[in-house]
């Protein structure tokens, strides 16, 4: 092996923490090595077996990475000799780390929109930290490379007051917040976010006429939820303004579903439990009991003739985030919030 290839191997690492497929991590690392001239034209790369053993990953992973690079003409191969660097005029791409607090249907919409809008403009690595602030802290400390942007959904189940201290570890000029804006994080950085208190108030106000047939409104908001508490504040504000009896339900398992109640549900798993309780009690959805679900997903328009949703535009969120990065903008944008009335109320 040449000295440049040996130098490349010394810096080569594959992260077990990243949700980005390992073959793409490997391919992107080789691209970076070509861009920074650690690898030069005609350098022979390690064989599939050698790289598999060195990185302790499968042969299939290395082979898939090499196929990807060969398809993009970055490397080529000679029968019996192996793979080598084919070109060095590799277009520079931004390196972006996207930190999701969890995997969910609506987060997938954001991710797909974000990745689609970025296209070939950037290499995107995905990390999931399970709404655990300590885990996020460990992730940030264990990253094996630096990024041009760190895009973060800052939703946490515990330790919210300590979140700004952790987020400050990301340089402000490389930070973007998605979904939620945190006032205590200093610096001039872009954000695409929801206004949780105002959004739920406005959505319920829009639905006020149809909600008036119910005696009380109940917000199903589990204690363990990573959703912002501003939702509760907006719910209380609406109910007090329009004189609705109201209650916060922290555990749907303990809830006795009664006629004349409309439920605003936050968690997807709780929606299933709530629907089961309504059906078991032989109550009619949209007449005896109302149901409003947070966060629009394609399936909700079909469940039981349609579940009413209150939701931000997740496709727009991902697209706007990509546009801000590509335009090097520091703008902070509130994403529109919509009520979709369906037969469930």
Image (cartoon, rainbow, N blue to C red):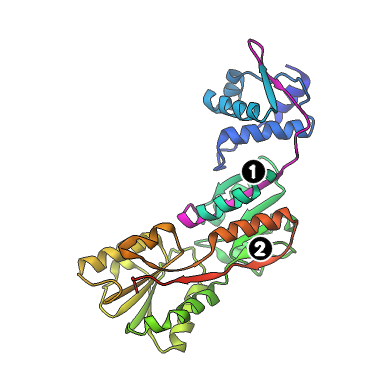
Query: Is there any visible trace of residue 166 in the rendered image?
Result: no
112, 137: nearer the viewer: 112
338, 197: nearer the viewer: 338
143, 22: nearer the viewer: 22
Locate residue 345, reporting x and y percent.
35, 74
Quadrant of the rendered image containing residue 320: bottom right
Q: Is residue 70 left or right of residue 234?
A: right
Q: Earlier in the sequence, mark 2 or mark 1?
A: 1
Q: Nearer the viewer, mark 2 or mark 1?
A: 2
Q: Residue at x 47, y 72 (%)?
A: 339
Q: Residues within 10 Å of mark 1 (few under 14, many from 20)?
A: some
Locate residue 194, reporting x and y percent.
57, 68
Locate residue 129, reporting x and y percent.
53, 51
Q: Is residue 280 above or below residue 12?
A: below
Residue indicated by mark 2 = 191
Find numbered disc 2 in the image and state the secondary structure of the residue it sits on.
strand
Find the magenta span and give its range.
78-107
Q: Residue at x 33, y 61 (%)?
A: 303
Total number of numbered discs in the rendering: 2
Residue indicated by mark 1 = 143
Q: CA distance from mark 2 to mark 1?
A: 23 Å
Q: Residue at x 74, y 56 (%)?
A: 327
Q: Residues within 10 Å of mark 2 (few under 14, many from 20)?
A: many
Q: Is residue 250 magenta?
A: no
Q: Is residue 309 above or below residue 133?
A: below
Locate residue 101, reporting x and y percent.
53, 55
310, 233: nearer the viewer: 310
Query: Is there any visible trace of residue 208 in the rendered image?
Result: yes
Q: Is residue 265 left or right of residue 154?
A: left
Find numbered disc 1 in the image and state the secondary structure of the residue it sits on.
loop
């Amino acid at each position: 092996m040449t000295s440049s290839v040996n130098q490349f191997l010394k810096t080569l690492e594959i992260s077990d923490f990243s949700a980005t497929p390992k073959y793409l991590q490997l391919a992107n690392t080789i691209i970076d090595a070509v861009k920074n001239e650690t690898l030069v034209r005609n350098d022979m790369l390690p064989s599939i077996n050698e790289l598999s053993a060195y990185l302790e990953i499968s042969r299939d992973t290395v082979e898939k990475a090499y196929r990807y690079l060969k398809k993009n003409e970055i490397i080529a191969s000679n029968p019996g000799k192996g793979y080598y660097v084919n070109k060095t005029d590799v277009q520079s791409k931004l390196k972006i780390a996207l930190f999701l607090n969890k995997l969910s249907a609506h987060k997938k919409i954001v991710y797909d929109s974000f990745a689609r809008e970025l296209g070939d403009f950037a290499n995107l690595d995905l990390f999931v930290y399970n709404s655990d602030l300590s885990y996020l802290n460990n992730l940030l400390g264990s990253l094996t490379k630096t990024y041009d942007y760190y895009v973060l959904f800052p939703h946490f189940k515990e330790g919210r007051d300590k979140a700004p201290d952790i987020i400050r570890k990301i340089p402000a000029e490389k930070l973007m917040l998605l979904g939620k804006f945190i006032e205590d994080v200093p610096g001039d950085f872009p954000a695409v976010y929801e206004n949780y208190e105002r959004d739920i108030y406005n959505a319920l106000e829009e639905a006020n006429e149809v909600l008036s047939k119910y005696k009380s409104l109940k917000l199903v908001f589990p204690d363990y939820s990573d959703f912002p508490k501003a939702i509760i504040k907006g719910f209380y504000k609406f109910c007090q303004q329009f004189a609705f009896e109201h209650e916060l339900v922290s555990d749907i398992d303990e809830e006795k579903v009664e006629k004349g109640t409309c439920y605003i549900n936050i968690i997807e798993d709780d929606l299933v439990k709530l629907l089961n309780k309504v059906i078991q009690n032989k109550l009619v959805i949209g007449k005896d009991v109302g149901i409003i679900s947070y966060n629009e997903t394609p399936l909700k328009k079909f469940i039981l003739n349609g579940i009413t949703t209150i939701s931000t535009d997740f496709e727009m969120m991902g697209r706007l985030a990509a546009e801000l990065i590509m335009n090097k903008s520091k703008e902070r944008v509130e994403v529109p919030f919509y009520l979709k009335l369906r037969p469930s109320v």
